[in-house]
Each structure stands twice: as structure tokens, then as C-alpha cells.
Image (spheres, rainbow, N blue to C red):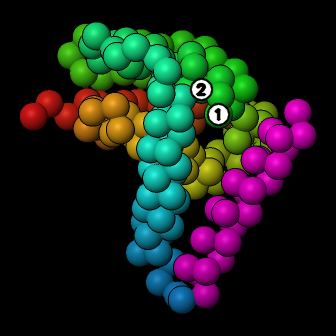
Amino acid sequence: MADDVLFEFLHMEMVSHIYKDQASRGEMEKDRATCVSTLEGMGFRVGQGLIERFTKDSPSFKDDLDVMKFICKDFWINVFRKQIDNLRTNHQGTYVLQDNKFALLTQFSNGKQYLEEAPKYLAYSCGLVRGALSNLGMDCVVTAEVSLMPSCKFQVVIQKI
């Protein structure tokens, strides 16, 4: 329980620090993309490291769906202390992971009060997922969408080579 709170505070401070650092330089619209990219890059590296540790004793995965099930169950439980609530796929490389009570948004609001602020708090998590999948050999694009806080949907599009 205490670990969860520490991680949430650390995450909020990372976002706050990066946005304040960029705001002090001016040109906020261009810097918003830089902030999101910085947070996503940090998450990417952490996701790579975490997935190495979580999969060291597990057997190899047989397909993309197996990997996504692992992300939704084991990876998500280890990082956010709960499973993804819903996993959907079109069986053509697009997956939607839905978390109805996303841990990094529950401290802000229930409803639509801070909806416009939500994306900056999701960039790190998108990077976590992308980094984990990258280390498992899946090149992908991860985006997040919030329509009602604290519910969140992550869309993972696998890039076929």
C-alpha cells in the first residue's frame, strides 16, 4: 500500500518537474510535445528493464496475443497492483487495454473535471507498455485515451515489418 502511494507521488512529481522545466523556457505548445516525448522515453526505458525481470523465468510466448495477455495480467499487476479490466483485439495487430480505475488518475478526479490534464499523466505509462513490448520483440505504437476519469484506454498498434 505504501509503495503504491510513493510511486504515485513520484510519478506526479516527474510530470510536474518536466512541465515546469519546459515552461520556464517559453514556447509552451512546442514544449508540450517535448514533455510528452520525454516522459514517454523515461517510461520506455523503465518498461524495458521491468519486462526483463518479470519474464526471466517464464516460457517464451507463442504469439502476439499471448504477449498481450501477459502484459494485461502479470505486468500490469506488478506495476499497478491490479489486472487490466478488459482486453480487446481485432486480430490484425490492434489491441485495446481498458483500465476502469487507472491508478495514476484516481488521485485527480472522478468525472470530467480535469480531463484536459489527463494526457500528460499517461505518457509515462504509454512508454512503460511500449518499452515492455519492445523488449519482447514487438515494435508498436501505444496511445492512451480518457473519456471519463479515472477510466483509461490504451491502444496498442503492432507495427508489422
Q: Which residue is mark 2?
A: 76
Q: Position of residue 57 (x, y in %)?
A: 49, 21
State which region is magenta: 1-24
- Specify the label residue 50 is tagged with: none
Q: Residue at x 52, y 87 (%)?
A: 26
Principal secondary structure, stretch drawn in magenta: helix
Q: CA distance from mark 1 to mark 2?
A: 5 Å
Left or right of 7, for residue 128: left
Q: Position of residue 54 (x, y in %)?
A: 54, 29
Left or right of 6, for residue 51: left
Q: Quadrant of residue 148?
A: top right
Secondary structure of the residue carrying numbered label 1: helix
- Residue at the farthest bottom position: 25
- Residue at the farthest left position: 161
Q: Residue at x 65, y 28 (%)?
A: 78
Residue flagged by tag 1: what amino acid is it? Val
Nearer to me, 16 or 10: 10
Q: Is residue 146 magenta?
A: no
- Specify the label residue 79 is tagged with: 1
Q: In this picture, is 72 found above or below 38?
A: above
Left or right of 69, for residue 20: right
Q: Is residue 10 magenta?
A: yes
Residue flagged by tag 2: what amino acid is it? Trp
Q: Quadrant of residue 140?
A: top left
Is residue 12 at least partly visible in the picture? Answer: yes
Q: Do tag 1 and tag 2 residues touch (Cβ < 8 Å)? A: yes
Q: Residue at x 29, y 17 (%)?
A: 64
Q: Position of residue 75 (x, y in %)?
A: 56, 26
Q: Position of residue 159 (x, y in %)?
A: 20, 34
Secondary structure of the residue carrying numbered label 2: helix
- Residue at the farthest right position: 2
